[in-house]
Image (spheres, grey):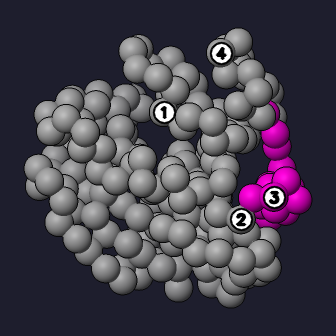
């Protein structure tokens, strides 16, 4: 899975909403804009990732080094938590999991994962109070919620050279119209990484 820094509390998020810290997205999609198959699986992405040259992670580690905390939904957390093999991909970066019902946190992740709930604005306010300035937002539903609240500073999408035909889209058509591409860079193995600003 693919997983740069703008500073300043009290910054202005997308579409004019005041945010308490910067919130950025870094995610991969298929060429036709899907983040998962209709059943939620991302095996196609994992298989593609396994074909990349050793040490090539699409800029994920560089991105992770630029953020202070990560916010994701329960389903995304469970997907990453249950991946077989390899270390926890987020290192010691605090991971805040949005869940109203709770979720099992393995012993090895105690102290790294915090369960929380609230609106996107409330979450960013709490993160800012903890000292975070740059936050990584992950998971389709969570990303869409932050976009709808006008709180995303930047969206970075790695477009993988695979077409799914159908699946779970990152954005609705209406939401896609709320972002504007500001740069696009070719990476290895046919990946194109595009950066968007919120209108």
The vertical placement of 159 against 197, above or below, is above
Tag 3–tag 2 contact (CB < 8 Å) = yes
Which circle marks residue 108 in the picture? Answer: 4
How far is disc 4 from disc 2 in space, using C-alphas? 26 Å
How far is disc 4 from disc 3 in space, using C-alphas? 24 Å
- Residue tagged by mark 2? 133
Q: Earlier in the sequence, mark 4 or mark 2?
A: 4
Secondary structure state at the residue bearing disc 3: loop
The vertical placement of 45 against 146, above or below, is above
Between 155 and 54, the one nearer to me in the picture: 54
Relative to 146, 120 lies left or right = right
- Report x, y in % for residue 69: 67, 50
- Residue tagged by mark 1? 89
Q: Earlier in the sequence, mark 2 or mark 1?
A: 1
Residue at figure coordinates x 65%, y 63% from the top left:
134
Image quarter for residue 146?
Answer: bottom right
Can residue 31 be seen?
A: no
Image quarter for residue 37?
Answer: top left
Q: Tell me where the magenta segment starts and ends, as one range.
A: 115-132
Q: Earlier in the sequence, mark 4 or mark 1?
A: 1
- Residue tagged by mark 3? 131
Between 23 and 117, the one nearer to me in the picture: 23
Q: Earlier in the sequence, mark 4 or mark 3?
A: 4
Residue at figure coordinates x 63%, y 48% from the top left:
70
Q: Point out the image quarter for the N terminus.
A: top left
How far is disc 2 from disc 1 in space, using C-alphas? 21 Å
Residue at figure coordinates x 65%, y 15% from the top left:
108
Tag 4–tag 2 contact (CB < 8 Å) = no
Secondary structure state at the residue bearing disc 4: helix
Q: Is residue 119 magenta?
A: yes
Relative to 2, 113 lies left or right = right
């Amino acid at each position: 899975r693919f997983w740069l820094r703008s500073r300043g509390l009290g910054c202005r998020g997308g579409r004019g909403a005041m945010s308490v810290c910067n919130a950025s997205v870094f995610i991969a999609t298929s060429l036709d804009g899907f983040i998962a198959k209709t059943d939620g699986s991302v095996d196609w992405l994992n298989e593609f990732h396994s074909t990349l040259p050793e040490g090539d992670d699409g800029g994920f580690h560089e991105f992770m080094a630029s953020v202070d905390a990560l916010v994701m939904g329960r389903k995304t957390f469970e997907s990453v938590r249950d991946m077989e093999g390899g270390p926890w991909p987020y290192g010691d970066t605090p991971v805040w999991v949005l869940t109203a019902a709770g979720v099992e946190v393995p012993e090895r992740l105690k102290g790294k994962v915090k369960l929380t709930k609230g609106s996107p604005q409330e979450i960013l306010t709490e993160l800012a109070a903890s000292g975070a300035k740059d936050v990584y937002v992950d998971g389709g539903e969570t990303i869409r919620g932050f976009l709808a609240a006008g709180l995303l500073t930047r969206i970075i999408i790695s477009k993988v050279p695979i077409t799914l035909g159908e699946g779970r889209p990152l954005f609705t058509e209406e939401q896609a119209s709320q972002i504007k591409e500001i740069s696009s860079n070719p990476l290895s193995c046919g990946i194109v990484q595009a950066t968007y600003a919120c209108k």
